[in-house]
Amino acid sequence: MADYDQISFRVDPDLKRQFELALVYRSVRQKRKATAVGVLTQKIEEFIAEEEKARASEP
């Protein structure tokens, strides 16, 4: 198993509830369990790719 680091941060309780509900909706829609780690990892990777692309296009 790979060695992983943990990322922790605080969010508004309403945002946390909305995120948890969205995970349930995604799980139902995809007919498989969506995990917070999976979703957040995907979004982090998308953010990094977007920023790398923006940085590469700077003069």
Image (cartoon, rainbow, N blue to C red):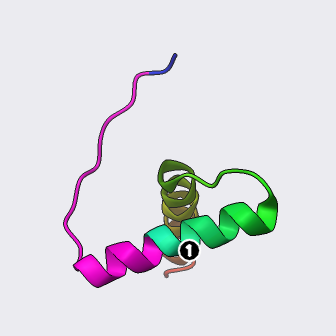
Residue 2, placed above or below residue 46: above
Q: Which residue is mark 1?
A: 22
Residue 48 versus residue 22: which sits nearer the camera?
A: 22
Q: Is residue 4 left or right of residue 43?
A: left
Tell me, yes or no, if residue 50 can be seen here. no
Residue 34 versus residue 9: which sits nearer the camera?
A: 34
Picture coordinates of residue 45, whole percent (x, y): 55, 57
Magenta residue check for 17: yes
Residue under the point 56% across and 50% down: 38
Picture coordinates of residue 50, whole percent (x, y): 56, 72
**For the magenta stretch, what is the residue range?**
3-19
Residue 5, placed above or below residue 17: above
Q: Is residue 24 left or right of residue 10?
A: right
Q: Is residue 34 left or right of residue 41?
A: right
Tell me, yes or no, if residue 9 can be seen here. yes
Picture coordinates of residue 26, whole percent (x, y): 68, 68
Picture coordinates of residue 54, whole percent (x, y): 53, 77
Corner quadrant of residue 56: bottom right
